[in-house]
Image (cartoon, rainbow, N blue to C red):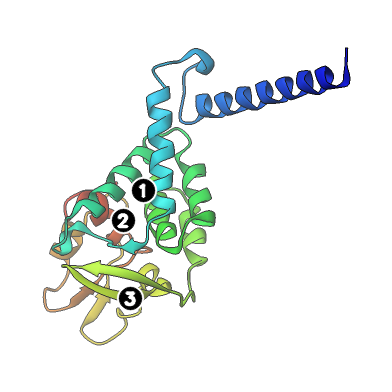
């Protein structure tokens, strides 16, 4: 066998192995079936999860909640992306990876997703953002602005007179919290207290 034929054979083997590896990765993402390599029903779900990760990873504008008067297409895309990932068996690992690798705005959406997993590790991951003064573009009620990442995760306003931060208990909705507190007190919402993650996916009445 000539040298050229040997090289061609090696290249063919390498390409085949690479394609097999890619297929295996796509087959196992989000699939709980026993025989994932032959599971054609799982492939659309795998593609949807990959698209959801891409949507969150590259997001550039922070919206935070549909309840503030803005329910445009961009918000809906983030909601669908988070719901798709949360439905995956590997949701926690996917979201942690996005917290580590996404654009700053995407990291915030991924952190909201981690809140809904109801895992004890959420608080520790949220602490990474304390003191992060980088600015992200925000939109609320069609108003464009910029806000510090640390202020979105940990509201700095609740310690002022007549103001408080919303901190939800397990099973509590934002509506429940508002009904249980003095209406004269101005509530502020952030990610760490759970209000923004809850309102992002469920509005005032949903609970994890």
- The structure residue drawn at horizontal position 45% and vertical position 32%, both measured from the top left corner, is 89
Q: Is mark 2 on a helix, strand or loop?
A: helix
Q: Residues within 10 Å of mark 3 (few under 14, many from 20)?
A: few
Residue 146's label in the rendered image is: 3
Residue 177 shown left or right of residue 170 in the figure = left
Residue 138's label in the rendered image is: none
Instruction: Tell which of 130 and 136 is nearer to you.
Output: 136
Q: Find the distance from the CA under tag 3 to the CA under tag 2.
A: 19 Å
Q: In the rendered image, is residue 172 in sight?
A: no
Q: In this view, does 106 lie above or below 130?
A: above
Q: CB atoms at circles 3 and 2 under 8 Å apart? A: no
Q: CB atoms at circles 3 and 1 under 8 Å apart? A: no
Q: In which quarter of the image is residue 48?
A: top left
Q: Mark 2 points at which residue?
A: 197
Task: Looking at the image, tell me whether mark 2 or mark 1 is earlier in sequence order.
Answer: 1
- The structure residue drawn at horizontal position 53% and vertical position 16%, both measured from the top left corner, is 37
Q: In which quarter of the image is residue 136?
A: bottom left
Q: CB atoms at circles 2 and 1 under 8 Å apart? A: yes
Residue 116's label in the rendered image is: 1
- The structure residue drawn at horizontal position 39% and vertical position 17%, both measured from the top left corner, is 41
Q: Residues within 10 Å of mark 1 (few under 14, many from 20)?
A: some
Residue 30: image location, x then y, percent: 46, 30
Q: In the rendered image, is residue 162 in sight?
A: yes
Task: Looking at the image, tell me whether mark 3 or mark 1 is earlier in sequence order.
Answer: 1
Q: In this view, does 10 lie above or below 35?
A: below
Residue 153: image location, x then y, percent: 39, 67
Q: What element carries label 3?
A: strand
- The structure residue drawn at horizontal position 30% and vertical position 50%, both measured from the top left corner, is 78
């Amino acid at each position: 066998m000539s040298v050229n034929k040997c090289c061609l054979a090696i290249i063919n083997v390498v390409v085949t192995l690479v394609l097999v590896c890619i297929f295996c990765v796509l087959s196992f993402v989000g699939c709980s079936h026993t025989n994932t390599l032959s599971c054609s029903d799982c492939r659309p779900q795998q593609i949807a999860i990959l698209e959801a990760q891409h949507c969150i990873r590259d997001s550039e504008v922070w919206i935070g909640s549909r309840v503030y008067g803005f329910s445009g297409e961009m918000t809906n895309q983030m909601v669908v992306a988070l719901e798709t990932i949360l439905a995956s068996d590997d949701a926690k690992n996917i979201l942690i990876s996005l917290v580590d690798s996404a654009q700053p705005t995407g990291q915030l959406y991924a952190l909201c997703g981690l809140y809904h997993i109801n895992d004890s590790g959420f608080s520790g991951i949220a602490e990474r953002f304390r003191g992060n003064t980088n600015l992200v573009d925000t939109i609320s009620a069609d108003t464009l602005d910029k806000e510090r990442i640390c202020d979105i995760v940990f509201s700095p306003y609740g310690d002022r007179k007549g103001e408080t931060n919303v901190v939800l208990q397990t099973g509590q909705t934002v509506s429940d919290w508002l009904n249980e507190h003095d209406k004269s007190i101005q509530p502020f919402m952030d990610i760490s207290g759970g209000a923004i993650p809850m309102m992002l996916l469920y509005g005032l009445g949903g609970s994890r």
